[in-house]
Amino acid sequence: MEQRVRTVVQATDQLSAAGLTGFLGGRAEIALVGAGRWVDAEVAVVAVAGLTGEVAAQLRRRAERARIPVVLVLDEVGEADVPTAVECGVVAILPRAGLTGEGLLTSVLTAASGRGVVAPTMVADLLGHVRRLRRQLVAPESERTTLTSREVEVLRLMADGLDTAEIATTLSYSERTIKNVFYRMTTRLDLRNRPHAVAYALRNGVI
């Protein structure tokens, strides 16, 4: 019999964890390892609602300790998720809606073989991200550090003491959109946190 793929499962809710481990644990091709034993695994399956900045940070920390491919199951896949996921060691992004057991198994086996499984509908997002990076590399420094009007709106409300939910309500966006705006801005400008971002905006006279 062929060697089984050692797989670790991590999910933010018990129902997802039970479903994933129940299915994968019953497959002859898979050998499950304990939830905290990433260093013993060949592939990680991670199920979360969305790829927030906090989730991305956790994945990066995991990647530093155990360099294994990650199959990511998301409730909702946003425009910024593909490039962010790739930076975090993710090789497969699977929208929870329509996900089948066989599709999950194929993704895990493909990830173990060293290949990625980005859905065809997400390729355009990834290519667009690459093109934006290329434009940034040839753009003047002043252009790369310019804040967009939406970023300025978010920072102004942060400076007024509003939290993410209040900012989303005020600007008529979802909380996820606000988190993505903040994450992309802080990553681009190398800002550590909210106070650092607000201080940057104040120093540059944009709020």
Image (cartoon, rainbow, N blue to C red):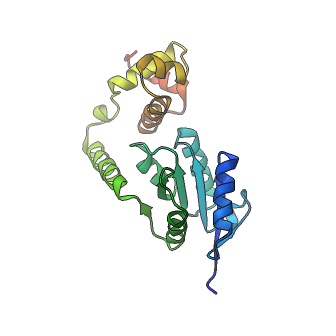
Which quarter of the figure is the C terminus placed in? top left
Q: Position of residue 9 (x, y in %)?
A: 65, 58
* In this rendering, position of residue 201 left or right of residue 56: left
Give the farthest residue toward the top: 160
Q: In which quarter of the image is residue 184?
A: top left
Between 80 and 49, the residue placed more toward the observer is 49
- The answer to whether residue 149 is above or below residue 134 is above
Which quarter of the figure is the N terminus placed in? bottom right
* In this rendering, position of residue 33 left or right of residue 63: right
Q: Position of residue 31 (x, y in %)?
A: 68, 71
- The answer to whether residue 118 is above or below residue 15 is below
What residue is shown at x 71% (from left), y 65% (from top)?
33
What residue is shown at x 70% (from left), y 48% (from top)?
14
Q: Quadrant of residue 56?
A: top right
Q: In the rendered image, is residue 203 in sight?
A: no
Between 99 and 71, the residue placed more toward the observer is 99
